[in-house]
Amino acid sequence: MNYLSVENISKSFGERTLFKDISFGINKDQKIAFIAKNGSGKTQIMRMINGDDEPDTGQIIIRKGIKMAFLSQNNLLQDELTIEESIFASDNDVLKVIERYEKALENPEDEEKYQLAFDEMDRHNAWDFETQFKQILSKLKLDDLKLKVKSLSGGQKKRLSLAIILINRPDLLILDEPTNHLDLEMIEWLESYFAKENITLFMVTHDRFFLERVCNEIIELDNGKLYSYKGNYSYYLQKKEERIAMENSSIDKAQNLFVKELAWMRRQPKARTTKSKSRQDDFYKIKEVAESRRKENVVELEINMERMGSKIIELHKLFKKFKDKVILDNFTYDFQRGERIGIIGKNGTGKSTFLNILTKTMVPDSGKVVIGDTIKVGYYTQSGINPKPGQKVIDIIKEYGEYIPLTKGKIISASQLLERFLFDAKKQYDFVEKLSGGELKRLYLCTVLIQNPNFLILDEPTNDLDIVTLNVLESFLLDYPGCLLVVSHDRYFMDKIVDHLFIFRGEGQIEDFPGNYSDFRAYEDSSEPTKKELNSVNTEKNSWKQNNSTAAGLNFNEQKEFNKLEREIKDLEYEKKQIENLFAEGKVSDAEITNKANELEKIIKKLEEKEERWFELSSKME
């Protein structure tokens, strides 16, 4: 059954065309993810579907009688209502019945009113519904129903909006970044909920685990064209690579034919026969294909990292609490060169407070933070950029100088740097307030890296970034030689980037876990009964090491190195294959042959070194 049809829609802003003649449909039980680069029109299409915007051409047809709900990035709640009142404010008949029953429970002495409410719950089969909606509120940590909306944090408001949508069970859910502002436990619950429920979804998300486990179709808007993939994220990656290879092959053939037809066109006499006119028309079609090679503009990240001395950052017996809530309880840690640490934990366990103390924007109740003389911290916070009124994109960068130093003594102008972050000459003179959420994040990332930090702290860096930019950021961070500390709910990102984790358990307890997020989940799932018997985080940590690292013959640091090597070898093998394919398909120009051959030689040498070390460590595990 078709729920919604998008027919030949287009949207332009002035001379800039976002998309043209886009068509697709949403059918019952489909779980569709919509993927596109930041600034290409994802949000506009979502707003058009919800009726908040109009296409320049075309139409959107929604099946009559379909109940649709839209979770946007903007809060549409009423500040003066409580959480409970916000939930019951919808026109859902069963919710009205539950509301009357809840009110009757508050006055049990009115037996007649209570009996009427009880009977009404029976008639509408509302008992299961009540259980389900209370479970949803519990999973999204909305326990105090009497809190007013105006007193909630931004994350709590987002979770309340999501809860209201899930409770009302619409026929079609339109979701814009549903995992933002959820902690990992909530994301995994929501993922499981969507995967098992017969529910129709159309969503924009950058969470690649979510795409993998929830979606059964992916629609991609790429260079102004729409492509559909009937499968999850892995299937999409495979088929997209095949599509691009096929497109490039067709373009190569068209280019060869174009050269031949161009010579024919130049030889043509002025008089045109019907036959030659037909061939002339075909020539222009061939010319269009031959000149249609993809413009793969990707973010280019490069920094001139400051030299790092022997002392990095030392944390000595940090203690911090807010009223009766302990955030840090005598936490001590000595950062080492090249460490790549991920931070995970439920919302409210103190992750952001810890980062603020580490960067000295907040003072601990006791203990101290000692930062080495050579350490330059780059701190990417969730608050982002705070531009002055009327400030343009290029003005933000010029605050750091007209010219910026890069690696190997190179310098680059502010304008050239912005181009590397996908801000073209025209976009650089746009007002900052006109940028999309993803573009703002990209600009902010530019301002952090421009300062050439050697200790990089990233607090939720993946929110609002498109998947293309995420892949570039991951590649950059894998090669980043400094220290890295990351707070992220993006499990795919964490698995790829970090070597070990700080797990914030609450009540000031922080566990140092040797592995990435998937390693941690496997550990948590396999040892739940044992963990209940353990008395402290330290005992847990030592138990894990004894059962894994020590038994395998590797110490703590070697286990971290071994895990990192496996990911590095995989990435190097992929890079090697890509260059070898270019040579095999004859796609390397004469001018590029030497550079590509040298690049391949370096990759092979690095791969051999990594593999040799991997074999050395793996032999200790036997």
Image (tube, rainbow, N blue to C red):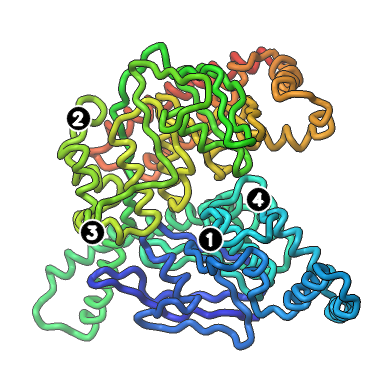
Badge 3: how crowded within 10 Å, few (<14), some, or many (20+)?
Answer: some
- Label 1 belongs to which residue? 150
**Three-letter amino acid code of the residue under disc 3:** Asp
Compared to residue 191, the image places residue 219 above or below, namely below
Which is more toward the observer, 250 or 482? 482
- Per the rendering, the mark at residue 430 is 3
In the displayed structure, would residue 296 be above or below residue 526? below
Q: CA distance from mark 1 to mark 3?
A: 33 Å
Labels 4 and 2: the sequence-earlier one: 4
Near-viewer residue (519 or 603): 519
In the drawing, what numbered circle is on residue 186?
A: 4
Residue where numbered disc 2 is placed: 410
**Front tag of 1 and 3:** 1
In this view, the residue farthest toward the bottom is: 64
- Between 484 and 2, the residue placed more toward the observer is 484
Residue 388's x, y, as percent?
25, 52
Q: CA distance from mark 4 to mark 1?
A: 23 Å
- Secondary structure state at the residue bearing disc 2: loop
| Residue 498 drawn at (x, y percent) | 53, 31
Callout 4 touching callout 2 (CB < 8 Å): no
> Which corner quadrant of the image does residue 288 belong to?
bottom left
Amino acid type of the residue that numbered disc 1 sits on in the rendered structure? Lys
Q: Label 2 to label 1, Cα distance in Å?
A: 50 Å
Which quarter shows the C terminus? Answer: top right
